[in-house]
Amino acid sequence: MGMFDTIRSSYDLGPGFWRRDLQTKGLECLMVEYWIDPSGQLFEIDYSGTQDFDLCPEQESKTPWNPYKAVPNGNHGKVRPVYVTATIEVYPAKWECHYAPFPRKIIQFVNGKLNEEIITCIDFSGCSS
């Protein structure tokens, strides 16, 4: 399977893709979180430095191989624009319509902005873009 990135989209990409978490292996593939705003701009969501890790008492530890627990430290994450030019494939993180084919879309970013002319759908008859 490998690692993937998650994209939260506020941009209407069509049926099955609007306002849901999407996955892709077309960007960093390092489990990075992204957001597409309503105008189609891509942003990276960075949570690094927002938590500290404290040693958990042995009786409270849920797993013997990880004796630490994450504790929020009051710092806020960062949201920054990403100026990537790439054509990527996205698909829903969860798809529970077992009777329907698994939807995938090809989308293109030019300098971090979604190119509306290249949104195409694969294996999903409900796509209208």
Image (cartoon, rainbow, N blue to C red):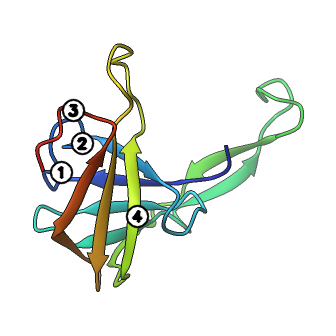
> Label 3 near label 1: C-beta < 8 Å?
no
> Label 2 near label 3: C-beta < 8 Å?
no
> Label 2 near label 1: C-beta < 8 Å?
yes
Characterize the local packing of mark 2: few (<14), some (14-19) or many (20 or more) Cα atoms within 10 angstroms.
Answer: many
| Residue 77 higher or lower than 68, as above or below | below
| Residue 125 higher or lower than 84, as above or below | above
Question: Alpha-carbon distance for marks 3 and 2?
Answer: 13 Å
Tell me the residue that label 2 is attached to: 17
- Give the residue drawn at x 18%, y 53%: 10
Characterize the local packing of mark 1: few (<14), some (14-19) or many (20 or more) Cα atoms within 10 angstroms.
Answer: many
Question: Alpha-carbon distance for marks 1 and 3?
Answer: 14 Å
- Give the residue drawn at x 37%, y 19%: 96
> For residue 37, what is the image quadrant?
bottom left
Give the side of residue 44 with respect to residue 120, left or right. right
- Callout 1 amino acid: Leu
**Depth order, front residue of 2/77:** 2
Tell me the residue that label 3 is attached to: 125
Q: Earlier in the sequence, mark 2 or mark 4?
A: 2
- Give the residue drawn at x 36%, y 26%: 101
Residue 13: numbered disc: 1
Q: Earlier in the sequence, mark 3 or mark 2?
A: 2
- Callout 4 amino acid: Ile
> Label 4 near label 2: C-beta < 8 Å?
no
Residue 88: numbered disc: 4
- Callout 3 amino acid: Ser
Q: Earlier in the sequence, mark 4 or mark 1?
A: 1
Q: Measured from the top left, where is residue 38 in percent x and y?
A: 11, 61
Q: Secondary structure at mark 1?
A: loop
- Give the residue drawn at x 34%, y 43%: 21
Q: Measured from the top left, where is residue 1 in percent x and y?
A: 67, 43
Question: Alpha-carbon distance for marks 2 and 4?
Answer: 14 Å
Q: Secondary structure at mark 2?
A: loop
